[in-house]
Amino acid sequence: MIKRIISTLMVFGLGIGLAMLLSWRYTKPIYNVVSAANRIAAGDLEQTLVTDSKDEIGELTQSFNFMVQKLREQRQMEEKLREAEHLSGIGQLSRSIAHEIRNPLNFISLSVDYIKEKFSPDGNIDAEKFHSLISNIKQEIQRLNKLVEEFLD
């Protein structure tokens, strides 16, 4: 009878040990997936899981890795989109600034031409100085226009 009780206890102990081993074998990979999912939920998309298993847990791990890869790709696309929107905004601002600079430059240039035609001095010395100043102003206007064009390119 004692042998029978000992045998029963041994079989029972072996069964419990086997159940614990199998339980650990299946819960450990699931725990790893849950842990990685929590890290991904916190924003860490560098998680990948390694598995050699071909069962359902292996499929779950492969699906998880595929999902993480797609999330990485989506994040990269969002970053590229943000950068493109930012660059587009800068381009629009640049064009607007260039327009705001060119309008006064055009007005100044036309005004200088008008002054040159209508108010040219009579004396040689004054006329020479006058035309030199007008020429310098026109050159500076052209230089500023060129800077604006280079800024846009």
Image (cartoon, rainbow, N blue to C red):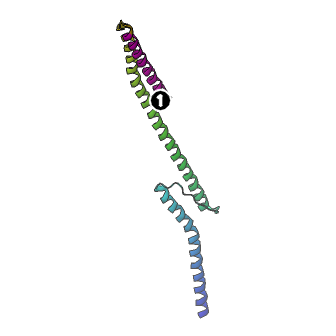
Instruction: Provide the residue span drawn in magenta.
Output: 125-153
Q: Give the residue displayed 38% in from the left and 11% down from the top.
A: 125
| Location of residue 86 in the rendering, given as x and y in whole percent from the top left corner | 45, 38
The three-letter code of the residue at mark 1 reads Phe
Q: Is residue 1 visible?
A: no
Is 47 placed above or below 7 here? above
Residue 87 seen from this side: yes
Up-down: is 122 above or below 140? above
Residue at figure coordinates x 41%, y 15% from the top left: 132
Residue lying at 59% horizontally and 93% vertically, measured from the top left? 2
Q: Which residue is tagged 1?
A: 151
Residue at the far bottom in the pictured view: 2
Q: How many marks?
A: 1
**How many C-alpha atoms fall within 10 Å of the one at disc 1: few (<14), some, or many (≥20)?**
few
Q: Is residue 144 magenta?
A: yes
Quadrant housing residue 148: top left
Residue 64 rendering spot, x and y as whole percentages: 56, 56
* Secondary structure predominantly adopted by residues drawn in magenta: helix
x%, y% of residue 116? 38, 10
Q: Is residue 82 left or right of residue 118?
A: right
Above or below for 93 versus 60? above
Magenta-drawn stretch contains 150: yes
Q: Position of residue 141 (x, y in %)?
A: 42, 21
